[in-house]
Amino acid sequence: MYDMKKIRNYIYGPIRSRRLGNSLGVDMVPHKTCSLDCVYCECGATTVHTIERREYINTDAVINEIDDYLSNATPPDYVTFGGSGEPTLHSGLGRIIRHLKERFPSQKLALLTNSTLLGDRGLREEILPCDLILPSLDAVTDEVFREINAPVAGIDCAGIIDALTALSAEYKGLMWLEVFIAPGINDGDEEIALFKEAITRINPTLVQLNSLDRKGTRETLTPAPIELLEEIARRFSPLPVEIVAKMK
């Protein structure tokens, strides 16, 4: 029996997720270590703004915590790589995925990613064993990208779209592409038309429209009204779209 009161440094939950059911989270980088500084991030402003992949925390320690949980507790619906920063920055991600698939082959793995490092072919190969990948795409023009996501210098929308397209072609699992709608920023007619063009090219399994749930880093940011999300979903047709934003 797993002791839920045990001190855990790298895993959290399981929590009940709207998209993933019963999800055991894995956090593999120090708090708010990320390649973006998004205006909607509920974890706060990015403190380490980087695109460098390295072993930010001990990979064996992460594996040991997950092993201990999965060997002694009811299996979650997903073990989810996410947390308070960008999980693909951790260079041990591929080793963790391979280990879990070998030791717990029936356990489903999910990856939440902001998509910025997917241009790295080696990284894409590392994540292919995941059962579900949930990348994000919040902008298709660089001006909007900078306003919403504040990327590290050198990252642009074209590169992210190319990388997502490459991943989609290589990947055999489910890809749910999340698009965060920020009213007044990325919901203009031109941006929505370009979104549809880019997403059609990427060809994900599903498009998930999301909006502000909890307070982000910009005080003036507001949730998108359901009517706006429904209109965007209609404009994305015939793409497979669902609205996952939590309506108040």
Image: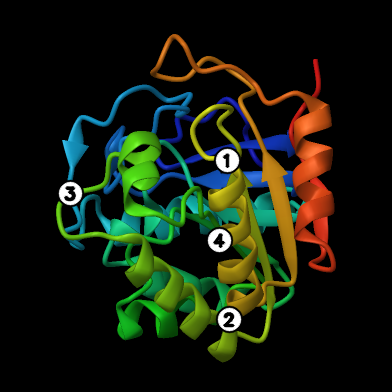
Q: What colour scheme was applied to this rendering of the protein?
A: rainbow
- Mark 1 or mark 3: whose residue is earlier in sequence: 3
Real-space CA distance between mark 2 and mark 4, rounded to the nearest whole angstrom = 18 Å
Residue at the extreme front of the image, as rendered = 189
* Foreground pick, 30 / 196: 196
Q: Which residue is mark 3?
A: 50
Q: Residue at x 36, y 40 (%)?
A: 149
Establish if 100 lies above or below 146. Answer: below
Disc 4, SS: helix
Residue kind at label 4, given as amino acid type: Leu
- Mark 1 or mark 4: whose residue is earlier in sequence: 1
Disc 1 packing (10 Å; few <14; some 14–19; many ≥20): few
* Foreground pick, 94 / 128: 128
Q: Are marks 2 and 4 in contact (CB under 8 Å)?
A: no
* Foreground pick, 79 / 34: 34
Real-space CA distance between mark 1 and mark 4, rounded to the nearest whole angstrom = 10 Å
Real-space CA distance between mark 3 and mark 2, rounded to the nearest whole angstrom = 25 Å
Identify the disc placed on residue 163: none
- Mark 2 or mark 4: whose residue is earlier in sequence: 2
Residue 226 percent location from the top left of the image: 81, 28
Residue 194 percent location from the top left of the image: 55, 61
Q: Which residue is mark 1?
A: 188
- Mark 2 or mark 1: whose residue is earlier in sequence: 2
Disc 3, SS: loop
Would residue 116 be found to the left or right of residue 247 on screen?
Answer: left
Q: Nearer the viewer, mark 1 or mark 3?
A: 1
Q: Which residue is mark 4?
A: 194
Establish if 72 lies above or below 128. Answer: above
Q: Nearer the viewer, mark 3 or mark 2?
A: 2
Residue at the extreme bottom of the image, as rendered = 170
